[in-house]
Image (cartoon, rainbow, N blue to C red):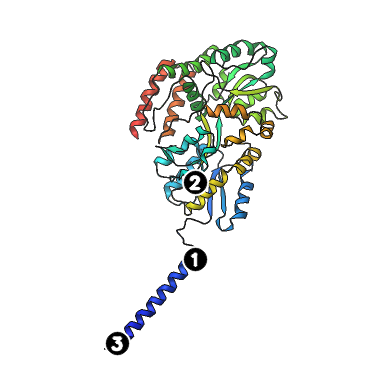
Amino acid sequence: MRWTSAAGRGLLALVLLLVASVTSSASAQPRRDAGRGPITLATAGDLTGYLGPLLEGWNRARPAERVRLVELPDSADETRAQMITDLRSGQGRFDVLNIDVAWTSEFAAAGWISPLDRQRFDLGAFLPPVVDTATYHGRLYAVPYVTNAGMLFYREDVLTAAGERPPRTWAELERQARTLAPRFGLDGYAGQFLPYEGLTVNATEAIYSAGGSILGDEQGRVAVDSAAARSGVAFLAGGVRDGWIPPQALSYTEEESRQAFQDGRLLFLRNWPYAWAGAAGSASRVAGRFGAVPLPGPAGPGTSVLGGSNLAVSSRAQHPRTAADLIGYLTSEAVQRRVLTEGALPPVRAALYGEPELVRRFPYLPALRESVLAARPRPKSPRYEQVSLVVQAVMHDALTQRETPAAAVRRLATELGAVAREE
């Protein structure tokens, strides 16, 4: 028995030695669950080719945490569909998602993206309203990457010749579009009025500018049945009825409306800041003869809808710590400057809007800053796609005079209420 006991003690010591060796070896290797390693960034098509060079700097500095860029279709709807297919499948092909600001609530409510630590990002340096697009129920689910706000482009040469200034109210816009435009052989005003997301944006801006809302909170409470909403709908519908919004504008998306202004056919255009580059280009008939200001409202400056995109970490990300670090890198001041100068996309960092060199290159920056600071997010809802489809359908009927503004608002309230009950 003494020999057996000694042998047992020796065997136990050997086992403990092996365990210690294995533990020591494992601790010397990077843990698989440490959250660091190669990642994938999924985004809609990069039309200017700026994003690849931005990521090269990251990959040189972090060879063990390289990021692979996956470009999805240019169409926002197709990009959203492909992202959702991957997220629902659980495959986890995408670690960081560059999502439209309107998708944040939907993706967060579905559990497809992970909450983020506010302290990890320099949110205090951002234009304040943009941060609201990245939150849902008070938690940060993404980080703003680029922003956008609607602006009013105008023919500076025409207004100067007429001794007028850019309109700051709806009444001034209507008067100039109705009286000045025909004198100079132009159509008055256009936005994006084809039934698609652009119409939702234009209608929401009109309702917001009048002091109204569509949804009252993130729970989907419908708040559209108001005098303010009726005023916003009536402003756009009346423009079509009275002719200072031309009938062809009912088929315009961003591109058709930009081309109409660039070709010298419009006095006023509501569009995103990207339209500046085309209007100032060598092929434009209005180069050097236009300007841009914030959207007007009933009694002064109006309220734009915030556009742009946010960066989120997939809840299926294999290396979430690296994913969060990449978001910090892409939203740093140095990289945000390149997002503007190389990608021609509006940055989220406030300081860049006041840099003299950047303002010389991008003259719309001061007006865009003013527009963003007065802007609001689109209605937050886990079923935002259905909300938008309702707004498009009802507003199209109002613009084509199939429904009065009052009837359109009542219908909006009823149909949005049905969407809310489905949540």
Image spot of residue 206 (x, y percent): 49, 21
Q: Nearer the viewer, residue 231 or 374?
A: 374
Q: Secondary structure at mark 2?
A: helix
Q: Mark 3 near mark 1, Cβ–Cβ under 8 Å?
A: no
Residue indicated by mark 1:
29
* Residue 4: assigned label: 3
Give the distance between the C-alpha atoms of the residues marked 2 and 3, in whole angstroms. 59 Å
Instruction: Examine the rendered structure and indicate whether residue 284 appears above or below residue 186.
Output: below
Q: Is residue 360 left or right of residue 74?
A: right
Residue 235: tell me if it is visible.
yes
First in residue order: circle 3 vs circle 1? 3
Task: Indicate the quadrant where residue 291 lies.
Answer: top right
Image spot of residue 165 (x, y percent): 64, 15
The quarter in which the C terminus is drawn is top left
Residue furthest to the left: 1
Image spot of residue 89 (x, y percent): 43, 49
Q: Nearer the viewer, residue 352 or 189?
A: 352
Residue indicated by mark 2:
120
Residue type pointed to by label 3: Thr
Classify mark 2: residues with Cα within 10 Å, few (<14), some (14-19) or many (20+): few
